Amino acid sequence: MQQAIIPVFKLRILKYGLLTLVLSVYSTGYAGTSITVPGSEFKTINRAMIQAKPGDTVWVENGSYTGHVAVEPGVTLISRISYGAVLDGNGRKTVVALKGKSTISGFEITNGTI
């Protein structure tokens, strides 16, 4: 009996998650783009954040990135490989500032706070 509950539960999560995604895209009219750092267009996270719009996802490759990062409203900042990208604050207190409805995932934060 318990084995039948798990697939139904997963289906419900998928159904509601997909509904949320569809409503988000419909309400903003913008599905967002993927930006890679470093990449051909952006060498730093901060340069990518200047151009990022709500709904965009900034993917960060492995490596160490020094300095303060301000994640713009509605932007998602993700390490391409979990904990493969390090945000080093150089002991300057706040390393990452999250602005309205922004998210960050998969980073190691050193020498500072969020």
Image: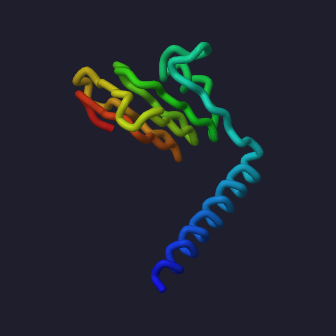
**Within the image, what quadrant is residue 65 found in?**
top left
Residue at horizontal 55%, vertical 31%?
58
Percent x, y for residue 44? 48, 17
Q: Specify whether 56 is left or right of 112.
A: right
Percent x, y for residue 13? 57, 66
From the viewer's side, name the closer residue of 89 and 106.
106
Percent x, y for residue 49? 54, 26
Q: Specify whether 22 is left or right of 38.
A: right
From the viewer's side, name the closer residue of 45 and 16.
16
Q: Is residue 19 above or below residue 99?
A: below
Residue at horizontal 53%, vertical 39%?
76
Percent x, y for residue 111? 23, 28
Q: Quadrant of the C terminus?
A: top left
Residue at horizontal 45%, vertical 30%?
70
From the viewer's side, name the closer residue of 55 and 18.
18
Q: Number of marks in the image?
A: 0
Residue at horizontal 55%, vertical 23%?
48
**Within the image, what quadrant is residue 73 found in?**
top right
Q: Residue furthest bottom?
A: 1
**Within the image, what quadrant is residue 105 found in?**
top left
Colour convention of the picture: rainbow
Q: Specify whether 19 is left or right of 108.
A: right
